[in-house]
Image: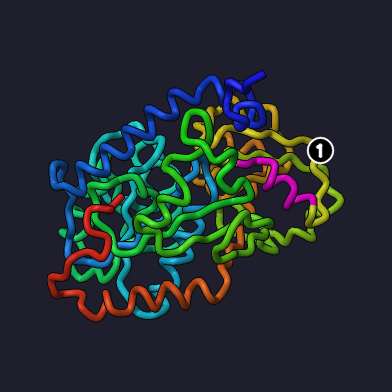
Amino acid sequence: MKQLLPKAWLTRGWLACLLWPAAQIYGLIIRLRLALYRGGFLRSERFGVPVIVVGNVVAGGAGKTPLVMVLVKHLQAQGWQVGVVSRGYGRVSQETLEVTSETPTSKSGDEPVLIKQTTNAPVFVAIRRTEALRALLAAYPSTAVVVCDDGLQHYALQRDIEVAVFDDRGIGNGWLLPAGPLREPWPARKRQGIDLVLHTGQKPAFEGFTSSRHLADHAVAANGSRVALTALRGQRLVALAGIASPEIFFAMLRARGLTLEKTVPLPDHHDFKPDELTACAGRTVLCTEKDAVKLFSLPELAQLRLLAVPLAFSPEPAFFTALDTLLAPLLSSRFSELPSIHGHQTT
């Protein structure tokens, strides 16, 4: 009997198969949108400063923000003034603003505040990243290089270097949304401007640079004091995480010899409510740095002992070498008007 359905439909899950027509429409929209930017029918802006975009081709978190913070520190160590722009995912405010360490996450999003607290670089958020960058340069005109947290698909902003981040999911089933996890076709997107690929997981699915991820040797309290993780061994602990993959955080804690009596996995960018901490009163609770940005400001914190455990994120040295090689000629011509090496493939 003649096979009526593609073999892939029989091997990649019926739900994905049912969503396959929608994925084809999504793919057509992606190609049309990119063609409109390339043809100049949609506006794409360049700002005369090198722009590095760190983003995902796969939906969901893969380690973009930790990489942004590492990149900013790497460039700062070389003496460059670095700025960061972001959309500020999850915020309720729509204004363009500069983020400070005291900015409420409801106005900025949690990740921009974390980036500010960790790097002390100027951080600006806006619905359109082009507006965030315009505001950044107006306030800090001597900025030498800008790092964009997410935005590979934000074609309105031209960029010079694109970094795609992947975790152990790789490209999943290889299908576009909603039938699969891809925001853009892969490996086609790599040929259209991706300069560096970084794998943040333990088992890279394809070629690219790698990075190590492990917890720091200490946890941090709201007052800035540190507690060695070894001092927490033998205690009955609660761990919560509102990140893309909470179980990875819990596994890392257990790998450090900690006993987790209870774990509370929450959605990424979870908006914590005061009563959610009530059940943890009198307990020692461990969370991620991103969660702590929100939790440390809650008045209910006095009812428990909350400790944030930092993540040590270290791309391999070859990654930084490749980045510096790409960036060197751009920085040397910082104040000259040069065309983007990516043209209108600016996401």
Q: Is residue 107 left or right of residue 43?
A: right
The image quadrant of residue 11 is top right
The image quadrant of residue 194 is bottom left
Which residue is labeled 1 in the image? 261
Residue for point 47% across, 51% down: 187
Q: Is residue 174 above or below residue 164?
A: above
**Figure disc tally:** 1
Start-end of magenta stretch: 245-254
| Front position in the image: 209 or 174 | 174
| Front position in the image: 240 or 315 | 315
The structure's colour scheme is rainbow
The image quadrant of residue 7 is top right
Q: Is residue 38 left or right of residue 306?
A: left
Measured as percent of width and height from the top left, residue 300 is found at 57, 34
Residue for point 73% across, 36% down: 263
Measured as percent of width and height from the top left, residue 239 is found at 70, 41
Residue with the most extreme front position: 1
- Residue 221 within the magenta-colored segment of the rendering: no
The kind of secondary structure the magenta stretch mainly shows is helix
| Front position in the image: 293 or 22 | 22
Residue for point 38% across, 34% down: 27
Decide if residue 298 is in sight here.
no
Q: Amino acid at mark 1?
A: Glu
Q: Residues within 10 Å of mark 1 (few under 14, many from 20)?
A: few
Q: Quadrant of the N terminus?
A: top right
Q: Judging from the image, what secondary structure is the residue with disc 1 in?
A: strand
